[in-house]
Image: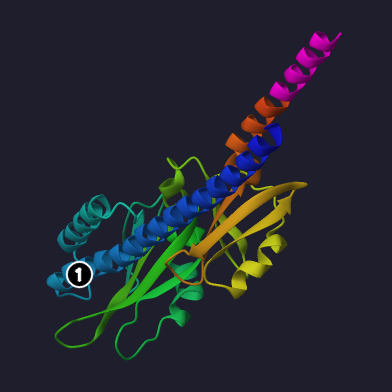
Amino acid sequence: NIVLLIFANYQFSQKELKSSVEHIQNECHLLHNDMKTQYHNVILCSNELISTINQTQSYYFSNPANSYLKSAFNYNLHLFSFVDSVVYLTVNDKIVCAGTDREPDLSKIKEELLDSIPSTGVPQNQFLNIQKRAYLGTDSPVLTFSKRVININTGKTLGYLFLNTKVATISSMFDNLNQNYYIINSKQGIVISNSESTSDPDSYSFIYSAKTGSQVINIDKKKHMLTWTPAGFLDYILVNETPLESLRSTFTINMFLLVLILILSTITIIFLIS
């Protein structure tokens, strides 16, 4: 009977493991959708700001226009919580910003960013890899959106718009999930994490060849289940890392109880025989 119970417990644990993996996959899929929504919200925010910039109809912002833009920028930061700061550089080298820790560095912005933005044609939505860009007025690593701003009537370039999302803002999406989540890519390794990762970034190399999946790997001599899906922006991948033992907790407890029952039964039989 004990053997049958152990077998039944094993079968139950396999079903429990499968159910847990499916739950994690569903959670990853929901996070992917949330991130994709925020990605599009950044673009929507840029469209609102560009419309506001066009309403000023001026290359050379007077103080009233500057104040109007700053107020509009702050309003949109409140409206689009995924965007932490806005920096707008005009063609005459004036900067209007909101949400920054300090004043952006004009010369550095021109040196580091303007060459990557096409100066002609239809303005393109561009997202730049997550990294530190202190010259945009923020010390934290950021996901940066950039776009050339044109006058919608004449097509002339008015300036360049940069929207920044801090790493902490992105990782806050994982705060209430009680799971270890990472955002990685093949060039940078782990760029965002809601926990201290002890794993070697190279251990994720097999992930880059498949868009989604699940696999058990060894981390610090313990088995972990990795589940991954596209993060929803650029080439970043969302990874869930869960210790395998936590997915089999019921199996472990049941095995402990069964072994305890077996020991007690053996002692009882020995006592009765003697």
Q: Can residue 160 be seen in the rendering of this structure?
A: yes
Give the x, y percent position of residue 172.
43, 46
Name the one closer to the observer, 94 or 119.
119
Name the one closer to the observer, 18 or 165.
18
* Dominant secondary structure of the residues highlighted in magenta in the image: helix
263 lies left or right of 176: right
The residue indicated by pointer 1 is 53
190 lies left or right of 26: right
Residue 191, placed above or below residue 205? above
Q: Can residue 138 be seen in the rendering of this structure?
A: no
Q: Residue at x 46, y 51 (%)?
A: 23
Q: Residue at x 79, y 19 (%)?
A: 266
Give the x, y percent position of residue 193.
55, 50
Residue 262 highlighted magenta (yes or no): yes
Residue 186, placed above or below residue 269? below
Give the x, y percent position of residue 269.
78, 16
Is the C terminus in the top left, top right, bottom left or bottom right quadrant?
top right
Q: Residue at x 42, y 60 (%)?
A: 29
The number of callouts visible is 1
Q: Residue furthest front?
A: 273
User: Magenta residues?
Assistant: 260-274
Q: Residue furthest bottom?
A: 121
Name the one closer to the observer, 106 or 212.
212
What's under tag 1, amino acid-wise?
Ile
Give the x, y percent position of residue 111.
50, 74
The structure's colour scheme is rainbow
216 lies left or right of 128: right
Q: Residue at x 47, y 59 (%)?
A: 142
Name the one closer to the observer, 118 or 56.
118
245 lies left or right of 263: left
The 10 Å Cα crowd at callout 1, few under 14, some 14 to 19, many 20 or more, is many
Residue 96 location, quadrant = bottom left
